[in-house]
């Protein structure tokens, strides 16, 4: 069945334009709610959101949808995506919902769904909900309509959980940490957790106004974080995105550290402690070849998946691994969480710093990345990758890089973009290959 609503990370789009309208949100609530009505118990759904202006509208529409099919609703308010996943399990809910478009601008929004186990929905569940959206969902009698309530201690519950992933014998005393919360969902919880563990905290991006989420701040715009870390003499900087499920780190010199380096550090630190499972890390096709070589030098493998943290998680479960993630900063640690968690990942980095007594710059540069280049080509309609000339250029590039690099060409699951990535030992060759493919795609998309 072709998907009309669900992409690689739930449903996402420009608000007040299909599919991100209040009407669709209401129908999603009805369809998802009806799909998860199993048994005679009183059913419950947990709903969190980030700080976007449209969150109020989408939240209200989802509440109407869920209650109309007999589900009770627990509202968390602004909370990180991983907090929603955790609280879905903790509160024995039948379903969890996060209203967020992650790192996208404020005008976009999205709906992410979690099953009762706290994991993102399977393809089968999404297909079933898609089918229900195309039909008519049966509403319950008036006496069985669900109730909605807001819980006030959700933040405290998540802070307690995040701190529990930090080794009990360690403290953050003496560390000055800059944390950029992207004016998003973690604007309260991340600074609080770090402060409670003993750090001196300099918070950035903690004044959300509905329209400034991810605006020149957070993991996709680390310049202010870099400047603040250097100017304040901080030991490290942590940058989260709008829903706090990804992490980018800045060392004390202002150098940006991506998810590949973070995965390498966490995996090798766990390997030394005998805690790494599966003898490997799971990452996407976009992770740098240098990560694969570095892990191999320690006798560890790298399993690659399609782009998207849900596919990383599926790979982790398949191979029995407990460390995985994406170059963009989604770090999944299944000993602690069922989805990417920027704060929890950051705490593991800080634990390694404290336990090893090393500066961020000495610890975070795990390997020398292979030259890698990623460019995006926007298109209005059609399927540029099906064009015969584009396919011919890609085939020629693959032959050219054979044995000395990699090529990844894919359509974005969240935006009308073709992503062109190449990497190899020769930087000039990588640039030439990417330029040739992008030119062909642009011509086909014109």
Image (tube, rainbow, N blue to C red):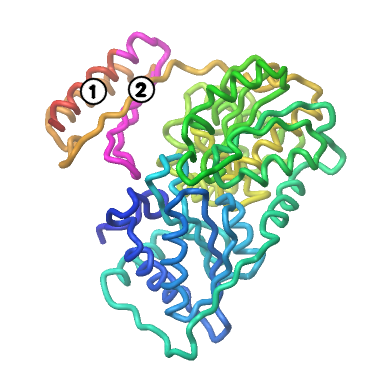
- Vertical relation: 112 (above or below) 192: below
Horizontal side of residue 79 vs 162, given as left or right: left
Assess whether mark 2 and mark 1 are in contact (beta carbons under 8 angstroms).
yes
Question: What is the x, y in percent for residue 15?
Answer: 34, 52
> Element at badge 1?
helix
Horizontal side of residue 418 vs 389, given as left or right: right
Quarter holding the N terminus is bottom left
- Vertical relation: 193 (above or below) 258: below
Mark 1 and mark 2 lie on one chain; the one further toward the N terminus is 2
Dot 2 corresponds to which residue?
422
Count of number-bearing discs? 2
Question: What is the span of residues highlighted in magenta in the rendered image?
Answer: 405-431
Quarter holding the C terminus is top left
The residue at 31%/41% (across/down) is 415
Snapshot quadrant of residue 352: top right
Snapshot quadrant of residue 264: top right
Is residue 145 magenta-colored? no
């Amino acid at each position: 069945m072709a998907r009309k609503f669900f992409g690689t990370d739930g449903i996402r789009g420009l608000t007040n334009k299909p599919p991100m309208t209040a009407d669709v949100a209401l129908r999603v609530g009805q369809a998802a709610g009806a799909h998860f009505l199993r048994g005679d118990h009183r059913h419950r759904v947990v709903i969190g959101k980030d700080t976007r202006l449209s969150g109020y509208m989408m939240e209200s529409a989802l509440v109407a949808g869920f209650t109309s099919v007999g589900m009770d609703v627990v509202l968390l308010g602004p909370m990180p995506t991983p907090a929603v996943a955790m609280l879905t399990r903790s509160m024995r809910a039948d379903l969890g919902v996060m209203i967020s478009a992650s790192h996208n601008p404020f005008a976009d929004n999205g709906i992410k769904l979690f099953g009762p186990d706290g994991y993102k929905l399977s393809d089968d569940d999404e297909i079933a909900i898609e089918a229900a959206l195309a039909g008519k969902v049966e509403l319950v009698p008036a006496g069985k309509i669900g109730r909605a309530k807001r819980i006030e201690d959700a933040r405290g519950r998540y802070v307690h959980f995040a701190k529990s992933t930090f080794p009990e014998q360690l403290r953050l005393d003496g560390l000055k940490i800059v944390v950029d919360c992207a004016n998003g969902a973690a604007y309260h919880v991340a600074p609080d957790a770090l402060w409670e563990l003993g750090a001196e905290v300099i918070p950035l991006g903690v004044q959300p106004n509905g329209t400034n989420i991810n605006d020149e701040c957070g993991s996709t715009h680390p310049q202010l974080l870099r400047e603040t870390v250097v100017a304040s003499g901080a030991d490290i900087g942590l940058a989260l995105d709008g829903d706090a499920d990804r992490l980018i780190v800045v060392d004390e010199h202002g150098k940006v550290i991506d998810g590949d380096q973070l995965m390498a550090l966490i995996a090798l630190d766990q390997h030394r402690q005998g805690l790494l499972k599966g003898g490997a890390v799971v990452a996407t096709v976009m992770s740098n070849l240098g990560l694969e070589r570095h892990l191999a030098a320690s006798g560890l493998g790298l399993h690659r998946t399609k782009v998207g943290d849900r596919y990383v998680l599926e790979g982790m479960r398949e191979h029995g691994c407990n460390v995985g993630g994406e170059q963009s900063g989604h770090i999944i640690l299944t000993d602690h969480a069922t989805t990417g968690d920027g704060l929890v990942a950051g705490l593991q980095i800080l634990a390694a710093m404290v336990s090893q007594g090393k500066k961020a710059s000495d610890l975070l540069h795990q390997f020398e990345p292979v030259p890698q280049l990623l460019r995006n080509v926007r298109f209005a309609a059609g399927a540029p990758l099906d064009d015969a000339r584009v396919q011919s250029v890609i085939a020629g590039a693959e032959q050219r890089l054979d044995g000395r690099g990699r090529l990844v060409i894919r359509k974005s699951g969240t935006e009308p973009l073709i992503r062109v990535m190449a990497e190899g030992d020769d930087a000039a060759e990588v640039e030439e290959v990417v330029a040739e493919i992008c030119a062909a795609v642009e011509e086909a998309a014109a």
